[in-house]
Image (cartoon, rainbow, N blue to C red):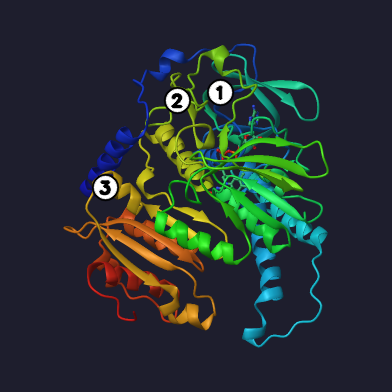
């Protein structure tokens, strides 16, 4: 049974969701849509289209809840973008290119002398592939363990309850679901006039498997994916220039002060930036690709050459070939499947989660929605707090944040108090000779309730979990400051930033 406290938390969260999701549809009785299929295959409780993070997590959770579930995936491997061409392979390249870069440039002060250091790019890629294969196979194992049927093929709606599948191994089948979840993810947004060949003009997918280090690379788009992949190739020896339309890197969600600090650090590492600049056109006919640039605010035009151009201007929902128009499922003007606060489309037995619908395109957001969607389906309640979803940029140092940024608060006229603590005053960072960055905390000046946390620094991506938990439980900066943190750890910088928010830091 739910306690009174948990009921009120659920009610508050539900109210929050209602107010943040763009469109709320009137729930319709599921029974209204139910049909019987005398001559077809066994009816499943749930059919999921897409075996990415959203789809595979929903499938496992549904299996755990005792549902008869099938998951259709066309890629030939489970885990979607995240495991195959996203989070996992990019973090493998980031980690190993960081080690390479550190061995080249950062061993002497540590008392380590190394001889000839060579890059073996083929082995670097192999290490990445080994991690990917291990993880995708692990999901197949979890499917078996939880009784999920894995159908390898491309799904298309035949009607509101039937999905036809063109099997990867040839032939066709169809599967009928009382309920269906659309979890077909996203794809890279193309750049008009520049044809992607994944060799010279690449998306992040091409950037994860280049065969040699290009002499020069231009990254169009200074968001997280562009900066992560730009970092990898810069560390491996490419001359990287990032062209960004906005006046800051990291996207509009990153706190501007943190963004500036991160840009300064990345610049010191050798990445060039052209902010407030837009790429107007590209010419791929010569040995070098020529990009025409224009200052976004009407400044001077210039041309820039590159061996490889990485298009990283964002991602868009992917619903190609799904047949949504045939069954009348609504999508909005940006191609996102329209859902209500319980992930139902306008066909209530068809739900939708992950990148293909509203919200940030993040694997952990997709995972939260997957669990919640199954809980709504099975039990009638679920929970995702969209105000406490962390973001991480895995450059070195990492950048991580959760909650509102200073520019958000200013824009919304919300009063706040700021506390900061630099890693240069943290004992562990000093011991590790890794002191760039800071923790920045924002709290309500009257109640001291945490409003946002922004970190640029070593291990920021792990530290943000503590901030997220604090935000989720409505902690104040004093709550954090009065919580004992082990010494010597980087997390002490987090505690000291909290002290600086409601009183004063001790070590700075
Ligand atoms: C380079 C890169 C790095 C990233 N790094 C991070 C990170 O560090 N952290 C993070 O949180 N997020 C990261 N992301 C984003 C993350 O990968 C996505 O948010 C996440 O994969 C979304 O999961 P999803 O299940 O909604 O979609 P997807 O992972 O895209 O999965 C959808 C799946 O559906 C399948 N599919 C589509 N249509 C059909 C059909 N008709 N029939 C059958 N199958 C179909 C596709 O083949 C795909 O496998 C990164 C993305 C990229 C590109």
Whether label 2 lies within 8 Å of ligand 1 gets the answer no
Q: Where does the image place residue 260, in percent across and percent down from the top left? A: 46, 59
Look at mark 2 in the image and give the residue it sits on: 338
Q: Where does the image place residue 311, in percent across and percent down from the top left? A: 65, 41
Tags 2 and 1 in contact by the CB under 8 Å rule? no
Tell me the CA gap for discs 2 and 1: 20 Å
Q: Residues within 10 Å of mark 3 (few under 14, many from 20)?
A: few
- The answer to whether residue 301 shows anywhere in this view is yes
* 170, above or below 471, in the image: above
Tell me which image quadrant ligand 1 sits in: top right
Tags 3 and 2 in contact by the CB under 8 Å rule? no
Query: In this rendering, would 362 be left or right of 173?
Result: left
Query: Picture quarter containing residue 108?
Result: bottom right
Tell me the CA gap for discs 3 and 2: 29 Å
Q: Where does the image place residue 161, in percent across and percent down from the top left? A: 55, 18
Mark earlier in primary sequence (2, 1): 1
């Amino acid at each position: 049974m739910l306690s009174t406290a948990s009921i009120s938390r659920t009610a508050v969260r539900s109210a929050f969701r209602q107010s943040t999701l763009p469109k709320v549809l009137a729930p319709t009785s599921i029974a209204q849509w139910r049909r019987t299929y005398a001559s077809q295959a066994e009816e499943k409780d749930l059919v999921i289209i897409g075996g990415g993070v959203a789809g595979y997590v929903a499938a496992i959770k549904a299996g755990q809840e005792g549902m008869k579930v099938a998951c259709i995936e066309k890629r030939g491997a489970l885990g979607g973008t995240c495991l195959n061409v996203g989070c996992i392979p990019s973090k493998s390249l980031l980690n190993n290119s960081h080690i390479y870069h550190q061995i080249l440039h950062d061993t002497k002060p540590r008392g380590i002398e190394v001889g000839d250091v060579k890059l073996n790019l083929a082995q670097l890629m192999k290490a990445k592939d080994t991690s990917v294969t291990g993880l995708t196979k692990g999901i197949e194992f979890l499917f078996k363990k939880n009784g999920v049927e894995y159908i390898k093929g491309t799904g298309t709606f035949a009607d509101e309850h039937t999905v036809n599948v063109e099997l990867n191994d040839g032939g066709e089948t169809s599967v009928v679901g009382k309920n269906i979840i659309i979890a077909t993810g996203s794809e890279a947004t193309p750049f008009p006039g520049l044809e992607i060949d994944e060799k010279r003009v690449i998306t992040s997918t091409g950037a994860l498997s280049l065969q040699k280090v290009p002499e020069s690379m231009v990254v169009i788009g200074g968001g997280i994916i562009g900066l992560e992949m730009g970092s990898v190739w810069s560390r491996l020896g490419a001359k990287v220039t990032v062209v960004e339309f906005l006046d800051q890197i990291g996207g509009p969600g990153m706190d501007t002060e943190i963004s500036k600090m991160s840009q300064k650090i990345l610049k010191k590492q050798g990445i060039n930036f052209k902010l407030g600049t837009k790429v107007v056109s590209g010419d791929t006919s010569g040995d070098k690709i020529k990009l025409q640039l224009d200052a976004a605010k009407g400044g001077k035009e210039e041309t820039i050459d590159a061996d490889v151009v990485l298009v990283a201007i964002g991602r868009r929902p992917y619903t190609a070939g799904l047949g949504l128009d045939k069954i009348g499922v609504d999508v909005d003007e940006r191609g996102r499947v329209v859902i209500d606060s319980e992930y139902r489309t306008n066909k209530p037995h068809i739900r939708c989660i992950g990148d293909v619908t509203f919200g940030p395109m993040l694997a952990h957001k997709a995972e939260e929605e997957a669990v919640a969607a199954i809980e709504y389906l099975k039990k009638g309640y679920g929970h995702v707090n969209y105000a406490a979803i962390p973001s991480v940029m895995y450059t070195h140092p990492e950048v991580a944040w959760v909650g509102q940024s200073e520019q958000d608060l200013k824009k919304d006229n919300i009063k706040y108090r700021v506390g900061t603590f630099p890693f240069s005053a943290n004992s562990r960072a000093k011991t590790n000779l890794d002191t760039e960055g800071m923790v920045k905390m924002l709290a309500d000046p009257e109640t001291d309730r945490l409003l946002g946390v922004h970190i640029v620094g070593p291990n920021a991506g792990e530290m943000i979990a503590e901030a997220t938990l604090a935000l989720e439980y409505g902690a104040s900066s004093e709550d954090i400051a009065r919580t004992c943190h082990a010494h010597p750890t980087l997390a002490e910088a987090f505690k000291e930033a909290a002290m600086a928010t409601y009183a004063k830091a001790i070590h700075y």
